[in-house]
Image (spheres, helix red, strand yellow):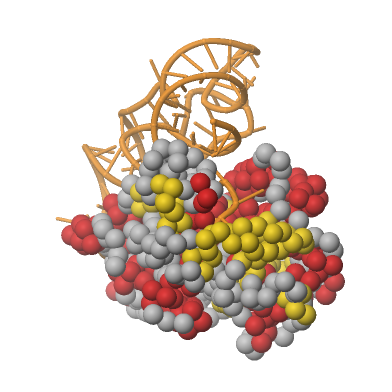
RNA sequence: GGGCCUGUAGCUCAAUGGUUAGAGCAGGGCGCUCAUAACGCCUUGGUUGGGGGUUCGAGUCCCUCCGGGCCUACCA
């Protein structure tokens, strides 16, 4: 038994996440957590909402609510949806927590004492109308290069030229449209990432088997241009972790907060403290402090590719730079993007299917199966309704669901709702045991390596093996000649259902529960011996014929959904 | 502009430089009748985006061209 710490990139607070967000971090992280728990390992699976920053303030303003209230409400909404998708977090925390505030300030102090923080004076665009400093992206104007009139402060979307806000002609606030923008001098703290460049590079070079996506992005940032740049870790905002040096004020930094990307990953740690403070556990340090028991922990992070630089560089700088024995990540699993029907999912434009809408249409297992079996691992992937319909109908309804139906209903009609007695396993059963033994090894290998799509394909092959066996054994024919022989076939098949419930749990936990309940199984552990696992249900053990596990998606429904989600949500 | 990823059957994807490039779905045929018009077996289908090169051997490595995508540090 090993100990595994797993974190999912923490979703931003400003609205309900879409299926692309879900499949890029939380869902595969949950798959892995469930799998490792199933194998009997000790798992700590943490996630939280990322609540600070300008977009949160603006979303709150738009909703007409104080930002703290808005965040509390949205956290509750996201927690409910996470529950709806059966995301099995040990704790779903908040980056705005007291625990994170203290820890973020403590890290800043440690980094400062290590000489890794420097003050920088700079000029920033201020909007008196909005009463706030504007990030470059929140300034628009005419591009000095091509004349495009909606160029953003950081880049022109028309000619792609990199810009500085001061370059824009007739700059205006994206928020209010105000044009009375002023350049103001302001002081900020920078994290001296450049000082740790060599240490970081050495660390990344010694990581084995990381996805190309992860290391290539990290390498690019380390070596591009002048190499890894120092990064501003403070902002002129109201909403965030106040800049302090531990418990002490930080002279000159009054009224400023830490940049959201500084405090967000620290929430991974603070979340474990929240877990303790919520009464769910007693010792968080054994997960996070290598001097206090975390030395044997394997830490795996899940995220979309846009998050990679922060997890391979900024956060490790925070950890390493502190000089304190915090647990550093062992494996980073990153994902490409899921596109929607020929374009991108978009939170800001409301394009695609969002978590709440998805659950309104179908239960979570349908989505979990499709998303995980099509996870964008090697390249961007695409969601289409046709593909979704075809996969769900074939894989879940026909291959797995129908297998359960044919076995349980045949048994009920011939032997009653009880595992039948008589006969014995023979060559056909031994062959299935051998095949499933090999397939289980493959399935485990893919899961251990977090090869999500390959694991899904192998699980499906394990389901298919049941139908092949049943067709070959043909109990409906055998029954006419030899009831005892038919009983053995059905006994074996009912045991296959129990096995499928166990192996499928990481992907489709609800169906797994339904099957376990139908088979009246309470102690189904991960099989280490297929032969034994397929004799677990003895003759005489009662069961119930479950409702159809999965229903099929009809063409009319699919067309209806296609039309309904073709535009943008309100 | 720069960097990275990607292009394989109608569709979604596999293939440590090494047999005749494989699966699933869709299509075609046969079988079965327990089951959600489900299942099983067989089968059609590929000049691996184009061109050039290295090699005994290239989907895989190199060059080049074409297409798709992401990132490029103050959105997060």
Q: Position of residue B5 (x, y in %)?
A: 54, 39
Q: Residue at x 40, y 63 (%)?
A: A178
Q: Position of residue A320 (x, y in %)?
A: 79, 60
Farthest residue in the bottom direction? A279
Q: Is residue A135 left or right of residue B9?
A: right
Q: Quadrant of residue B67?
A: top left
Q: Residue at x 79, y 71 (%)?
A: A109
Q: Is residue A483 visible?
A: no
Q: Which of the pair B4/A62 is nearer the observer? A: A62
Q: Which of the pair B10/A322 is nearer the observer? A: A322
Q: Is residue A182 left or right of residue A370?
A: right
Q: Which of the pair A99/A172 is nearer the observer? A: A172
Relative vertical location of residue A454 with respect to residue A10 in this rendering, above or below: above
Q: Quadrant of residue A327?
A: bottom right
Number of numbered markers: 0
Q: Residue at x 37, y 47 (%)?
A: A149
Farthest residue in the left direction? A556
User: Which quarter of the image is occupied by the C terminus of chain A?
Assistant: bottom left
User: Which quarter of the image is occupied by the N terminus of chain A?
Assistant: bottom right
Relative vertical location of residue A84 with respect to residue A469 in this rendering, above or below: below
Q: Is residue A194 visible?
A: yes
Q: Residue at x 29, y 54 (%)?
A: A385
Q: Position of residue A272 (x, y in %)?
A: 67, 77
Relative vertical location of residue A295 with respect to residue A370 in this rendering, above or below: below
Q: Which of the pair A220/A328 is nearer the observer? A: A220
Q: Position of residue A176 (x, y in %)?
A: 39, 66
């Amino acid at each position: 038994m090993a100990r595994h710490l797993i974190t999912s990139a923490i979703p931003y607070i400003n609205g309900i996440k879409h299926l692309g967000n879900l499949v890029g971090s939380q869902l595969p992280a949950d798959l892995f957590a469930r799998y490792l728990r199933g194998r009997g390992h000790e798992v700590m699976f943490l996630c939280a909402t990322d609540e600070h920053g300008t977009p949160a303030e603006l979303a709150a303003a738009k909703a007409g609510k104080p930002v703290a209230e808005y965040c509390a409400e949205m956290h509750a909404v996201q927690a409910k949806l996470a529950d709806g998708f059966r995301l099995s977090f040990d704790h779903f925390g908040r980056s705005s927590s007291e625990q994170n505030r203290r820890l973020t300030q403590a890290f800043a102090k440690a980094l400062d004492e290590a000489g890794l923080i420097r003050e920088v004076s700079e000029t920033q665009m201020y909007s008196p109308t909005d009463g706030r400093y504007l990030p470059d992206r929140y300034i628009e104007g005419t591009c000095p290069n091509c004349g495009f009139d909606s160029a953003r402060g950081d880049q022109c979307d028309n000619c792609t030229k990199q810009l500085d806000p001061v370059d824009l002609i007739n700059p205006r606030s994206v928020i209010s449209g105000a044009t009375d923008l002023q350049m103001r001098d302001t002081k900020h703290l920078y994290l001296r990432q450049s000082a740790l460049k060599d240490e970081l590079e050495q660390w990344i070079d010694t990581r084995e088997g990381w996805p190309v996506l992860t290391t290539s992005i990290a390498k690019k940032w380390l070596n591009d241009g002048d190499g890894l740049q120092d990064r501003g870790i403070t902002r002129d905002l109201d909403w965030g972790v106040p800049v302090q040096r531990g418990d002490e004020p930080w002279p000159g930094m009054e009224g400023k907060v830490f940049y959201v990307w500084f405090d967000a990953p620290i929430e991974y740690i603070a979340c474990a403290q929240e877990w303790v403070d919520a009464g769910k556990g007693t010792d968080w340090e054994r997960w996070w402090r290598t001097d206090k028991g975390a030395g044997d922990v394997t830490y795996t992070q899940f995220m979309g590719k846009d998050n990679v630089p922060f997890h391979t560089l900024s956060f490790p700088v925070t950890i390493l730079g502190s000089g304190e024995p915090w647990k550093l990540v062992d494996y980073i699993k990153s994902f490409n993007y899921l596109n929607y029907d020929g374009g991108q999912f978009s939170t800001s434009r409301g394009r695609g299917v969002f978590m709440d809408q998805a659950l309104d249409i179908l239960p979570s297992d349908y989505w979990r199966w499709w998303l995980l079996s099509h996870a964008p691992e090697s390249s961007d992937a695409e969601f289409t309704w046709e593909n979704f319909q075809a996969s769900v109908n074939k894989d879940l309804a026909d291959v797995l669901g129908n297998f359960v139906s044919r076995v349980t209903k045949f048994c009920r009609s011939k032997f009653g709702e009880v595992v039948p007695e008589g006969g014995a396993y023979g060559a056909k059963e031994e062959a299935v045991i051998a095949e499933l033994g090999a397939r289980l090894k493959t399935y485990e290998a893919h899961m251990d390596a977090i090869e999500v799509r390959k694991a899904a394909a192998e699980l499906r092959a394990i389901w298919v093996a049941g139908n092949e066996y049943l067709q070959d054994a043909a109990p409906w024919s055998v029954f006419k000649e030899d009831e005892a022989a038919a009983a053995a076939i059905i006994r074996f098949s009912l045991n296959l259902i129990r096995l499928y419930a166990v192996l499928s749990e990481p992907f489709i936990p609800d169906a797994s529960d339904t099957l376990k309940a139908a088979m009246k199984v309470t102690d189904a552990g991960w099989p280490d011996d297929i032969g034994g696992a397929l004799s677990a249900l003895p003759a005489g053990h009662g069961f119930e014929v479950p409702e159809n596990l999965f229903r099929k998606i009809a063409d009319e429904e699919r067309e209806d959904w296609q039309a309904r989600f073709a535009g943008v949500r309100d």
